[in-house]
Image (spheres, grey):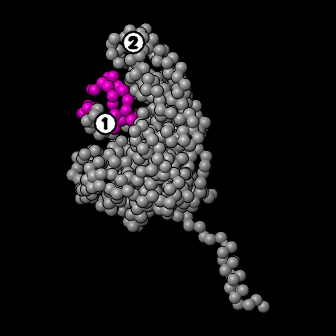
Amino acid sequence: MIAKPFRLLAAAVTLLAAPLAAQEMPTTPPKLVVMISADQFSTDVFEEYRPFYQAGLKRLSQGAVFPNGYQSHAATETCPGHSTLMTGDRPARTGIIANNWFSFKGPRPGEVYCAEDERLGTFKDYVPSDLHLRVPTLGERMKARDRRTRTVSIAGKDRAAIMMGGHKMDAIWFWRDGQGFVSTLKTAAPKTVVAANDAARAAIAAPAAAKPLPDFCESISRPVKVGEAVMGAGRFERAGGNESLWKASPDFDAAIGKLAADVVADMKLGSGPATDVLTVGLSATDYVGHRYGTAGSEMCIQVAALDRTVGALLDALDATGVDYVVGFSADHGGNDLPERERERAVPHAARVDPALAPSSLGKKIAAELGWTGGQLLYGSLNGDVWLAPELTGEWRTRVRDAAIAAWRASPQVASVLTAEEVRATPMPTGTPDTWSIAERQRAAYDAERSGDLFVFLKPAITPNQTGATHGSPWDYDRRVPILFWRKGIGRFEQPLAVETVDIMPSFAALVGLKLAPGEVDGRCLDLDGGPADTCAIKR
Protein backbone atom coordinates (compact mmCIF):
# COMPACT_ATOMS: atom_id res chain seq x y z
CA MET A 1 0.00 0.00 0.00
CA ILE A 2 1.36 3.42 -0.93
CA ALA A 3 1.40 5.92 1.91
CA LYS A 4 -0.81 8.96 1.44
CA PRO A 5 2.06 11.54 1.13
CA PHE A 6 3.61 9.47 -1.63
CA ARG A 7 0.25 9.13 -3.37
CA LEU A 8 -0.06 12.94 -3.34
CA LEU A 9 3.49 13.32 -4.65
CA ALA A 10 2.82 10.81 -7.42
CA ALA A 11 -0.35 12.68 -8.38
CA ALA A 12 1.56 15.96 -8.48
CA VAL A 13 4.25 14.47 -10.70
CA THR A 14 1.56 13.09 -13.02
CA LEU A 15 -0.04 16.53 -13.30
CA LEU A 16 3.31 18.17 -14.03
CA ALA A 17 4.11 15.57 -16.66
CA ALA A 18 0.72 15.88 -18.36
CA PRO A 19 0.61 18.36 -21.28
CA LEU A 20 -1.14 21.60 -20.42
CA ALA A 21 -4.00 22.75 -22.60
CA ALA A 22 -2.49 25.27 -24.98
CA GLN A 23 -3.95 28.75 -25.04
CA GLU A 24 -4.88 29.43 -28.63
CA MET A 25 -4.82 32.65 -30.57
CA PRO A 26 -8.33 33.66 -31.65
CA THR A 27 -9.37 32.90 -35.21
CA THR A 28 -11.70 35.90 -35.23
CA PRO A 29 -10.31 39.21 -36.54
CA PRO A 30 -8.72 41.44 -33.91
CA LYS A 31 -10.51 44.67 -33.10
CA LEU A 32 -7.34 46.73 -33.21
CA VAL A 33 -4.16 46.38 -35.27
CA VAL A 34 -1.15 48.10 -33.68
CA MET A 35 2.18 48.62 -35.46
CA ILE A 36 5.09 49.96 -33.40
CA SER A 37 8.31 51.07 -35.08
CA ALA A 38 11.44 51.85 -33.06
CA ASP A 39 13.58 54.04 -35.30
CA GLN A 40 17.13 52.65 -35.83
CA PHE A 41 16.49 49.57 -33.65
CA SER A 42 18.68 47.01 -35.38
CA THR A 43 18.66 43.27 -34.78
CA ASP A 44 22.20 43.69 -33.44
CA VAL A 45 20.94 45.97 -30.66
CA PHE A 46 17.78 43.89 -30.08
CA GLU A 47 19.81 40.72 -29.56
CA GLU A 48 22.53 42.34 -27.45
CA TYR A 49 20.06 43.36 -24.73
CA ARG A 50 17.53 40.56 -25.13
CA PRO A 51 18.45 38.77 -21.86
CA PHE A 52 17.65 41.94 -19.91
CA TYR A 53 14.17 42.83 -21.18
CA GLN A 54 11.62 43.02 -18.39
CA ALA A 55 8.54 44.69 -19.88
CA GLY A 56 7.23 45.30 -23.40
CA LEU A 57 10.06 43.76 -25.40
CA LYS A 58 10.01 40.75 -23.10
CA ARG A 59 6.31 40.23 -23.80
CA LEU A 60 6.74 40.68 -27.55
CA SER A 61 9.58 38.14 -27.43
CA GLN A 62 7.02 35.61 -26.16
CA GLY A 63 5.12 35.80 -29.42
CA ALA A 64 6.16 35.17 -33.02
CA VAL A 65 9.78 36.30 -33.31
CA PHE A 66 11.61 36.87 -36.60
CA PRO A 67 15.04 38.22 -35.56
CA ASN A 68 16.31 38.30 -39.14
CA GLY A 69 13.87 40.75 -40.59
CA TYR A 70 15.25 42.81 -43.45
CA GLN A 71 14.67 46.27 -44.75
CA SER A 72 15.84 44.54 -47.88
CA HIS A 73 16.57 47.59 -50.02
CA ALA A 74 19.84 49.55 -50.09
CA ALA A 75 18.25 52.87 -49.04
CA THR A 76 18.25 52.20 -45.29
CA GLU A 77 16.84 55.52 -44.14
CA THR A 78 13.83 56.56 -42.07
CA CYS A 79 11.39 57.46 -44.83
CA PRO A 80 11.84 54.46 -47.16
CA GLY A 81 12.01 52.09 -44.20
CA HIS A 82 8.74 53.30 -42.71
CA SER A 83 7.11 53.17 -46.13
CA THR A 84 7.58 49.38 -46.22
CA LEU A 85 6.06 48.55 -42.83
CA MET A 86 2.35 49.03 -43.50
CA THR A 87 2.20 48.97 -47.31
CA GLY A 88 3.79 45.59 -47.98
CA ASP A 89 5.85 47.21 -50.73
CA ARG A 90 9.52 47.98 -51.23
CA PRO A 91 10.64 51.55 -52.03
CA ALA A 92 10.70 50.76 -55.76
CA ARG A 93 6.92 50.52 -55.47
CA THR A 94 6.19 53.03 -52.70
CA GLY A 95 8.23 55.69 -54.54
CA ILE A 96 9.98 56.63 -51.29
CA ILE A 97 13.56 56.04 -52.40
CA ALA A 98 15.30 58.09 -49.69
CA ASN A 99 14.70 60.73 -47.04
CA ASN A 100 15.55 63.38 -49.65
CA TRP A 101 16.10 63.36 -53.37
CA PHE A 102 16.81 65.86 -56.12
CA SER A 103 14.29 66.78 -58.79
CA PHE A 104 15.22 69.33 -61.41
CA LYS A 105 11.67 69.62 -62.72
CA GLY A 106 8.37 70.46 -61.12
CA PRO A 107 7.23 73.39 -58.97
CA ARG A 108 10.47 73.74 -56.99
CA PRO A 109 13.58 72.34 -58.71
CA GLY A 110 16.21 71.13 -56.27
CA GLU A 111 16.15 69.02 -53.13
CA VAL A 112 12.84 67.42 -52.16
CA TYR A 113 11.90 65.97 -48.77
CA CYS A 114 10.09 62.63 -48.86
CA ALA A 115 7.16 63.79 -46.71
CA GLU A 116 6.51 67.28 -48.06
CA ASP A 117 4.40 69.02 -50.66
CA GLU A 118 7.01 71.08 -52.50
CA ARG A 119 4.24 73.12 -54.15
CA LEU A 120 3.54 74.82 -50.82
CA GLY A 121 6.80 75.51 -49.02
CA THR A 122 10.58 75.53 -49.12
CA PHE A 123 12.91 72.64 -48.39
CA LYS A 124 13.85 74.06 -44.98
CA ASP A 125 10.34 75.29 -44.16
CA TYR A 126 8.34 72.50 -45.74
CA VAL A 127 4.68 71.54 -45.47
CA PRO A 128 4.31 67.89 -44.30
CA SER A 129 2.35 65.81 -46.79
CA ASP A 130 1.63 62.27 -48.02
CA LEU A 131 2.01 63.48 -51.62
CA HIS A 132 4.95 61.25 -52.56
CA LEU A 133 3.68 57.91 -51.19
CA ARG A 134 2.43 56.03 -54.25
CA VAL A 135 0.70 53.03 -52.67
CA PRO A 136 -1.98 52.51 -50.01
CA THR A 137 -1.30 51.39 -46.46
CA LEU A 138 -3.11 48.63 -44.60
CA GLY A 139 -5.28 51.23 -42.87
CA GLU A 140 -6.29 52.74 -46.20
CA ARG A 141 -7.17 49.35 -47.65
CA MET A 142 -9.24 48.46 -44.59
CA LYS A 143 -11.01 51.82 -44.69
CA ALA A 144 -11.82 51.30 -48.39
CA ARG A 145 -13.38 47.95 -47.45
CA ASP A 146 -15.27 49.32 -44.45
CA ARG A 147 -15.47 53.09 -43.99
CA ARG A 148 -16.08 52.57 -40.27
CA THR A 149 -12.42 51.55 -39.82
CA ARG A 150 -10.46 54.29 -38.08
CA THR A 151 -6.76 54.84 -38.73
CA VAL A 152 -4.55 56.76 -36.31
CA SER A 153 -0.82 57.50 -36.48
CA ILE A 154 1.35 58.90 -33.66
CA ALA A 155 5.11 59.42 -34.07
CA GLY A 156 8.13 61.45 -33.19
CA LYS A 157 8.78 62.21 -36.88
CA ASP A 158 6.37 63.34 -39.56
CA ARG A 159 7.82 60.89 -42.09
CA ALA A 160 7.22 57.97 -39.72
CA ALA A 161 3.61 58.97 -39.02
CA ILE A 162 2.79 59.67 -42.67
CA MET A 163 4.47 56.65 -44.23
CA MET A 164 2.86 54.19 -41.81
CA GLY A 165 -0.54 55.88 -41.69
CA GLY A 166 -0.94 56.74 -45.36
CA HIS A 167 -3.27 59.11 -47.13
CA LYS A 168 -6.58 58.82 -45.31
CA MET A 169 -6.29 59.04 -41.55
CA ASP A 170 -8.73 59.91 -38.83
CA ALA A 171 -5.99 61.30 -36.60
CA ILE A 172 -2.27 61.93 -37.06
CA TRP A 173 0.10 63.58 -34.58
CA PHE A 174 3.85 63.98 -34.86
CA TRP A 175 6.51 66.14 -33.25
CA ARG A 176 7.66 69.29 -34.99
CA ASP A 177 10.54 71.24 -33.46
CA GLY A 178 9.48 74.36 -31.66
CA GLN A 179 5.79 73.50 -32.04
CA GLY A 180 5.18 70.20 -30.27
CA PHE A 181 2.83 67.50 -31.56
CA VAL A 182 1.08 68.76 -34.69
CA SER A 183 -1.11 67.27 -37.41
CA THR A 184 -1.53 67.42 -41.17
CA LEU A 185 -5.30 67.46 -40.61
CA LYS A 186 -7.06 70.76 -40.14
CA THR A 187 -8.51 69.82 -36.76
CA ALA A 188 -8.11 71.41 -33.36
CA ALA A 189 -5.86 69.57 -30.94
CA PRO A 190 -7.89 67.50 -28.47
CA LYS A 191 -7.22 67.70 -24.74
CA THR A 192 -4.90 64.69 -24.89
CA VAL A 193 -2.58 66.43 -27.38
CA VAL A 194 -2.73 69.76 -25.53
CA ALA A 195 -1.74 67.96 -22.33
CA ALA A 196 1.06 66.09 -24.13
CA ASN A 197 2.47 69.35 -25.49
CA ASP A 198 2.25 71.09 -22.11
CA ALA A 199 4.09 68.19 -20.46
CA ALA A 200 6.74 68.12 -23.20
CA ARG A 201 7.40 71.86 -22.99
CA ALA A 202 7.79 71.62 -19.22
CA ALA A 203 10.20 68.68 -19.58
CA ILE A 204 12.29 70.50 -22.18
CA ALA A 205 12.45 73.67 -20.09
CA ALA A 206 13.59 71.90 -16.91
CA PRO A 207 17.11 70.56 -16.34
CA ALA A 208 17.35 66.77 -16.28
CA ALA A 209 19.41 64.78 -13.80
CA ALA A 210 21.51 61.79 -14.89
CA LYS A 211 19.41 58.69 -15.43
CA PRO A 212 20.17 55.54 -13.42
CA LEU A 213 22.64 53.17 -15.03
CA PRO A 214 21.28 49.60 -15.11
CA ASP A 215 23.66 46.94 -13.85
CA PHE A 216 23.97 45.36 -17.29
CA CYS A 217 25.12 48.72 -18.72
CA GLU A 218 28.08 49.15 -16.38
CA SER A 219 30.57 47.07 -18.36
CA ILE A 220 30.07 49.09 -21.54
CA SER A 221 29.97 52.51 -19.90
CA ARG A 222 33.35 53.68 -21.16
CA PRO A 223 34.25 57.06 -22.62
CA VAL A 224 35.44 57.40 -26.20
CA LYS A 225 36.66 60.62 -27.77
CA VAL A 226 34.96 61.70 -31.00
CA GLY A 227 36.64 64.87 -32.19
CA GLU A 228 36.37 67.28 -29.27
CA ALA A 229 33.40 65.44 -27.72
CA VAL A 230 33.37 62.47 -25.36
CA MET A 231 30.70 59.78 -25.78
CA GLY A 232 29.98 56.38 -24.31
CA ALA A 233 29.57 57.01 -20.58
CA GLY A 234 26.77 59.59 -20.57
CA ARG A 235 23.48 59.31 -18.72
CA PHE A 236 21.34 61.98 -20.41
CA GLU A 237 21.87 64.76 -17.88
CA ARG A 238 21.12 68.10 -19.52
CA ALA A 239 20.53 71.75 -18.82
CA GLY A 240 17.05 73.14 -19.32
CA GLY A 241 15.84 74.49 -22.63
CA ASN A 242 17.58 72.07 -25.01
CA GLU A 243 14.96 70.44 -27.24
CA SER A 244 17.53 68.50 -29.28
CA LEU A 245 18.94 66.77 -26.20
CA TRP A 246 15.43 66.01 -24.95
CA LYS A 247 14.65 64.29 -28.26
CA ALA A 248 17.93 62.36 -28.08
CA SER A 249 16.90 60.79 -24.77
CA PRO A 250 14.42 58.19 -23.48
CA ASP A 251 12.09 61.04 -22.48
CA PHE A 252 11.06 61.57 -26.10
CA ASP A 253 9.81 58.00 -26.56
CA ALA A 254 8.01 58.18 -23.22
CA ALA A 255 6.10 61.25 -24.44
CA ILE A 256 5.20 59.58 -27.76
CA GLY A 257 4.10 56.35 -26.09
CA LYS A 258 1.95 58.15 -23.52
CA LEU A 259 0.26 60.22 -26.21
CA ALA A 260 -0.49 57.06 -28.19
CA ALA A 261 -2.02 55.42 -25.11
CA ASP A 262 -4.08 58.53 -24.33
CA VAL A 263 -5.37 58.75 -27.91
CA VAL A 264 -6.41 55.07 -27.79
CA ALA A 265 -8.46 55.76 -24.67
CA ASP A 266 -9.82 59.09 -25.93
CA MET A 267 -10.96 57.70 -29.29
CA LYS A 268 -11.91 54.29 -27.87
CA LEU A 269 -9.94 52.59 -30.62
CA GLY A 270 -10.90 48.96 -31.09
CA SER A 271 -14.36 49.48 -29.59
CA GLY A 272 -16.22 50.33 -32.77
CA PRO A 273 -18.02 48.09 -35.27
CA ALA A 274 -14.92 47.62 -37.46
CA THR A 275 -11.26 46.86 -36.83
CA ASP A 276 -9.18 50.00 -36.23
CA VAL A 277 -5.49 50.60 -37.00
CA LEU A 278 -2.92 52.39 -34.83
CA THR A 279 0.67 53.04 -35.89
CA VAL A 280 3.24 54.35 -33.42
CA GLY A 281 6.68 55.67 -34.37
CA LEU A 282 9.12 55.78 -31.44
CA SER A 283 12.00 57.98 -32.59
CA ALA A 284 14.41 58.37 -29.67
CA THR A 285 16.61 55.37 -30.48
CA ASP A 286 17.52 57.03 -33.78
CA TYR A 287 18.43 60.36 -32.19
CA VAL A 288 20.45 58.57 -29.50
CA GLY A 289 22.19 56.42 -32.10
CA HIS A 290 23.16 59.37 -34.29
CA ARG A 291 24.51 61.44 -31.42
CA TYR A 292 26.11 58.83 -29.18
CA GLY A 293 26.49 55.70 -31.30
CA THR A 294 24.94 52.27 -30.80
CA ALA A 295 27.23 50.66 -28.21
CA GLY A 296 27.78 52.88 -25.15
CA SER A 297 25.94 53.60 -21.92
CA GLU A 298 23.59 55.98 -23.74
CA MET A 299 22.18 53.30 -26.04
CA CYS A 300 22.06 50.78 -23.21
CA ILE A 301 19.97 53.14 -21.05
CA GLN A 302 17.81 53.99 -24.08
CA VAL A 303 17.03 50.34 -24.86
CA ALA A 304 16.06 49.65 -21.24
CA ALA A 305 13.75 52.67 -21.40
CA LEU A 306 12.34 51.58 -24.78
CA ASP A 307 11.43 48.27 -23.15
CA ARG A 308 9.51 50.13 -20.44
CA THR A 309 7.83 52.50 -22.92
CA VAL A 310 6.56 49.63 -25.06
CA GLY A 311 5.45 47.85 -21.89
CA ALA A 312 3.48 50.88 -20.71
CA LEU A 313 1.72 51.12 -24.09
CA LEU A 314 0.84 47.42 -24.05
CA ASP A 315 -0.46 47.75 -20.48
CA ALA A 316 -2.66 50.65 -21.61
CA LEU A 317 -3.99 48.54 -24.48
CA ASP A 318 -4.68 45.67 -22.06
CA ALA A 319 -6.66 48.03 -19.84
CA THR A 320 -9.11 48.73 -22.66
CA GLY A 321 -10.16 45.07 -22.80
CA VAL A 322 -9.89 45.21 -26.59
CA ASP A 323 -8.63 42.21 -28.58
CA TYR A 324 -5.57 43.65 -30.31
CA VAL A 325 -2.64 42.33 -32.30
CA VAL A 326 0.66 44.18 -32.22
CA GLY A 327 3.59 44.14 -34.59
CA PHE A 328 6.98 45.61 -33.77
CA SER A 329 9.91 46.38 -36.05
CA ALA A 330 12.18 49.19 -37.24
CA ASP A 331 12.77 51.34 -40.29
CA HIS A 332 16.49 50.51 -40.41
CA GLY A 333 19.44 49.62 -38.20
CA GLY A 334 22.60 51.56 -37.57
CA ASN A 335 26.36 51.40 -37.19
CA ASP A 336 28.44 52.51 -34.22
CA LEU A 337 31.00 55.29 -33.92
CA PRO A 338 34.13 54.30 -35.87
CA GLU A 339 36.29 55.59 -33.01
CA ARG A 340 34.75 53.00 -30.66
CA GLU A 341 34.68 50.30 -33.32
CA ARG A 342 38.45 50.57 -33.69
CA GLU A 343 38.74 49.87 -29.97
CA ARG A 344 36.48 46.83 -30.40
CA ALA A 345 38.22 44.73 -33.02
CA VAL A 346 37.20 46.66 -36.16
CA PRO A 347 40.55 48.18 -37.17
CA HIS A 348 39.33 49.27 -40.62
CA ALA A 349 36.50 51.43 -39.23
CA ALA A 350 36.96 55.05 -40.30
CA ARG A 351 35.20 58.23 -41.32
CA VAL A 352 34.99 58.90 -45.02
CA ASP A 353 37.48 61.10 -46.79
CA PRO A 354 35.56 64.41 -47.21
CA ALA A 355 36.96 64.71 -50.73
CA LEU A 356 34.71 61.84 -51.80
CA ALA A 357 31.49 63.74 -51.08
CA PRO A 358 29.65 64.47 -54.37
CA SER A 359 29.80 68.24 -53.93
CA SER A 360 33.55 68.16 -53.17
CA LEU A 361 34.40 65.69 -55.92
CA GLY A 362 32.30 67.71 -58.34
CA LYS A 363 34.41 70.83 -57.65
CA LYS A 364 37.60 68.86 -58.28
CA ILE A 365 36.27 67.47 -61.56
CA ALA A 366 35.09 70.92 -62.65
CA ALA A 367 38.59 72.31 -62.11
CA GLU A 368 40.20 69.44 -63.99
CA LEU A 369 37.81 69.63 -66.95
CA GLY A 370 37.47 73.40 -67.07
CA TRP A 371 33.75 73.45 -66.27
CA THR A 372 32.47 76.85 -65.16
CA GLY A 373 28.72 76.20 -65.24
CA GLY A 374 28.08 75.52 -61.56
CA GLN A 375 27.65 72.45 -59.35
CA LEU A 376 28.19 69.13 -61.11
CA LEU A 377 27.14 66.43 -58.62
CA TYR A 378 24.28 66.32 -56.13
CA GLY A 379 23.45 63.79 -53.44
CA SER A 380 25.40 61.87 -50.83
CA LEU A 381 27.47 58.77 -50.33
CA ASN A 382 25.81 55.40 -49.65
CA GLY A 383 23.09 56.12 -52.14
CA ASP A 384 21.88 58.27 -55.00
CA VAL A 385 23.99 60.82 -56.85
CA TRP A 386 22.52 63.09 -59.54
CA LEU A 387 24.38 64.72 -62.42
CA ALA A 388 23.63 68.39 -62.93
CA PRO A 389 20.78 68.86 -65.43
CA GLU A 390 22.95 71.33 -67.37
CA LEU A 391 25.25 68.46 -68.33
CA THR A 392 24.37 67.17 -71.79
CA GLY A 393 26.10 65.26 -74.55
CA GLU A 394 29.87 64.89 -74.24
CA TRP A 395 30.03 66.96 -71.04
CA ARG A 396 27.66 64.58 -69.29
CA THR A 397 29.67 61.54 -70.34
CA ARG A 398 32.98 63.12 -69.31
CA VAL A 399 31.78 64.16 -65.88
CA ARG A 400 30.06 60.84 -65.20
CA ASP A 401 33.12 58.82 -66.22
CA ALA A 402 35.46 61.02 -64.18
CA ALA A 403 33.28 60.66 -61.08
CA ILE A 404 33.00 56.89 -61.46
CA ALA A 405 36.75 56.53 -61.92
CA ALA A 406 37.52 58.67 -58.87
CA TRP A 407 35.15 56.77 -56.60
CA ARG A 408 36.22 53.34 -57.83
CA ALA A 409 39.85 54.27 -57.23
CA SER A 410 39.16 55.00 -53.56
CA PRO A 411 39.95 52.24 -51.03
CA GLN A 412 36.89 53.39 -49.04
CA VAL A 413 34.35 52.75 -51.82
CA ALA A 414 32.80 49.30 -52.29
CA SER A 415 30.69 49.83 -55.39
CA VAL A 416 29.58 52.39 -57.97
CA LEU A 417 26.55 51.55 -60.09
CA THR A 418 24.93 53.46 -62.93
CA ALA A 419 21.19 53.86 -63.31
CA GLU A 420 21.42 51.81 -66.50
CA GLU A 421 23.02 48.93 -64.59
CA VAL A 422 20.36 49.06 -61.88
CA ARG A 423 17.49 49.19 -64.37
CA ALA A 424 18.94 46.13 -66.14
CA THR A 425 18.97 44.18 -62.87
CA PRO A 426 15.84 42.05 -62.43
CA MET A 427 13.78 42.67 -59.31
CA PRO A 428 15.37 40.34 -56.74
CA THR A 429 13.85 37.07 -55.61
CA GLY A 430 14.84 34.69 -52.86
CA THR A 431 15.80 35.65 -49.34
CA PRO A 432 17.16 39.18 -48.89
CA ASP A 433 20.33 38.05 -47.13
CA THR A 434 21.54 36.63 -50.47
CA TRP A 435 20.89 39.68 -52.67
CA SER A 436 23.72 41.45 -54.49
CA ILE A 437 24.30 45.17 -54.00
CA ALA A 438 22.73 45.80 -57.40
CA GLU A 439 19.64 43.85 -56.36
CA ARG A 440 19.41 45.77 -53.08
CA GLN A 441 19.47 49.01 -55.01
CA ARG A 442 17.00 47.68 -57.57
CA ALA A 443 14.50 47.23 -54.72
CA ALA A 444 14.76 50.98 -54.08
CA TYR A 445 14.94 52.21 -57.66
CA ASP A 446 12.34 54.56 -59.09
CA ALA A 447 12.89 55.78 -62.65
CA GLU A 448 11.41 59.20 -61.94
CA ARG A 449 13.16 59.94 -58.63
CA SER A 450 16.34 57.87 -58.34
CA GLY A 451 19.82 59.15 -59.11
CA ASP A 452 22.07 58.72 -62.11
CA LEU A 453 24.74 56.95 -60.05
CA PHE A 454 24.78 54.96 -56.80
CA VAL A 455 27.87 55.08 -54.62
CA PHE A 456 28.31 52.72 -51.66
CA LEU A 457 31.07 52.87 -49.09
CA LYS A 458 32.72 49.78 -47.67
CA PRO A 459 31.42 48.35 -44.37
CA ALA A 460 32.34 50.39 -41.26
CA ILE A 461 33.18 53.49 -43.31
CA THR A 462 31.00 56.26 -41.84
CA PRO A 463 29.83 58.81 -44.44
CA ASN A 464 29.77 61.77 -42.04
CA GLN A 465 32.35 63.48 -39.84
CA THR A 466 30.48 63.51 -36.51
CA GLY A 467 28.37 61.00 -34.60
CA ALA A 468 27.14 57.71 -36.06
CA THR A 469 24.68 56.98 -38.84
CA HIS A 470 22.98 54.50 -41.18
CA GLY A 471 21.97 54.37 -44.84
CA SER A 472 24.34 51.73 -46.18
CA PRO A 473 23.44 48.50 -48.03
CA TRP A 474 25.13 46.42 -45.32
CA ASP A 475 23.31 44.15 -42.91
CA TYR A 476 23.96 46.24 -39.80
CA ASP A 477 21.66 48.80 -41.45
CA ARG A 478 19.29 46.34 -43.17
CA ARG A 479 18.64 43.76 -40.45
CA VAL A 480 15.82 44.55 -37.98
CA PRO A 481 13.69 42.42 -35.64
CA ILE A 482 10.08 41.64 -36.54
CA LEU A 483 7.85 40.62 -33.63
CA PHE A 484 4.14 39.85 -33.40
CA TRP A 485 2.04 39.35 -30.28
CA ARG A 486 -1.63 38.69 -29.60
CA LYS A 487 -3.30 37.24 -26.55
CA GLY A 488 -3.16 33.46 -26.89
CA ILE A 489 -0.29 33.42 -29.38
CA GLY A 490 2.14 30.54 -28.98
CA ARG A 491 5.79 31.48 -28.68
CA PHE A 492 8.07 30.50 -31.54
CA GLU A 493 11.14 31.86 -33.25
CA GLN A 494 11.96 31.69 -36.95
CA PRO A 495 15.59 32.69 -37.56
CA LEU A 496 15.52 32.58 -41.36
CA ALA A 497 15.45 35.84 -43.32
CA VAL A 498 12.12 37.56 -43.92
CA GLU A 499 11.30 41.11 -45.04
CA THR A 500 9.57 44.05 -43.40
CA VAL A 501 7.22 44.09 -46.40
CA ASP A 502 5.86 40.81 -45.01
CA ILE A 503 4.32 42.60 -42.02
CA MET A 504 1.36 44.15 -43.83
CA PRO A 505 0.14 40.97 -45.59
CA SER A 506 0.48 39.12 -42.27
CA PHE A 507 -1.84 41.65 -40.64
CA ALA A 508 -4.12 41.57 -43.69
CA ALA A 509 -4.66 37.83 -43.27
CA LEU A 510 -5.64 38.29 -39.62
CA VAL A 511 -8.30 40.88 -40.47
CA GLY A 512 -9.56 38.98 -43.53
CA LEU A 513 -8.35 41.52 -46.09
CA LYS A 514 -7.75 39.65 -49.34
CA LEU A 515 -4.73 40.56 -51.46
CA ALA A 516 -4.36 39.36 -55.02
CA PRO A 517 -1.16 37.48 -55.93
CA GLY A 518 1.56 40.03 -56.67
CA GLU A 519 -0.55 42.93 -55.40
CA VAL A 520 2.16 43.72 -52.86
CA ASP A 521 5.82 42.75 -52.64
CA GLY A 522 5.53 41.01 -49.27
CA ARG A 523 4.13 37.64 -48.30
CA CYS A 524 2.03 36.55 -45.35
CA LEU A 525 3.95 35.09 -42.39
CA ASP A 526 2.19 32.28 -40.52
CA LEU A 527 2.00 33.52 -36.94
CA ASP A 528 0.82 30.23 -35.47
CA GLY A 529 3.71 28.02 -34.39
CA GLY A 530 1.58 24.86 -34.67
CA PRO A 531 -0.36 23.16 -37.46
CA ALA A 532 -2.82 26.04 -37.84
CA ASP A 533 -1.98 28.65 -40.47
CA THR A 534 -2.94 32.27 -39.85
CA CYS A 535 -2.42 32.96 -43.54
CA ALA A 536 -5.13 30.49 -44.49
CA ILE A 537 -7.93 31.35 -42.07
CA LYS A 538 -11.24 31.73 -43.92
CA ARG A 539 -13.23 34.71 -42.66
- Whether residue 337 appears in magenta in the rendering, the answer is no
Q: Which structural element holds mark 2? A: helix
Q: Which structural element holds mark 1? A: loop
Q: Which residues are magenta?
A: 98-122
- Left or right: 528 in relation to 290: right
- Please tell me whether residue 101 is drawn above or below residue 229 in the rendered image: above
Q: Position of residue 375 (x, y in %)?
A: 35, 18
- The answer to whether residue 304 of the structure is visible from this angle is yes
Tag 1: amino acid: Glu
Q: Residues within 10 Å of mark 2 (few under 14, many from 20)?
A: few
- At horizontal 23% and vertical 53% (from top left) the residue drawn is 189
- At horizontal 52% and vertical 22% (from top left) the residue drawn is 410
- The number of callouts visible is 2
- Left or right: 313 in relation to 423: left
Lower position in the chain sequence, tag 1 or tag 2? 1
Q: Residue furthest left?
A: 188
Which residue was labeled with disc 1?
Answer: 116
Distance CA(mark 1)–CA(mark 2) = 35 Å
Checking the image for residue 438, the label placed there is none
Quadrant assignment, res 348: top right
- The answer to whether residue 427 of the structure is visible from this angle is no
Q: Nearer the viewer, residue 433 or 364?
A: 364
Tag 2: amino acid: Ala
- At horizontal 54% and vertical 47% (from top left) the residue drawn is 44
Q: Position of residue 18 (x, y in %)?
A: 67, 73
Q: Nearer the viewer, residue 52 or 152?
A: 52
Q: Position of residue 97 (x, y in %)?
A: 42, 33
- Identify the image quadrant of the N terminus: bottom right
Q: Residues within 10 Å of mark 1 (few under 14, many from 20)?
A: many
Which residue was labeled with disc 2?
Answer: 367
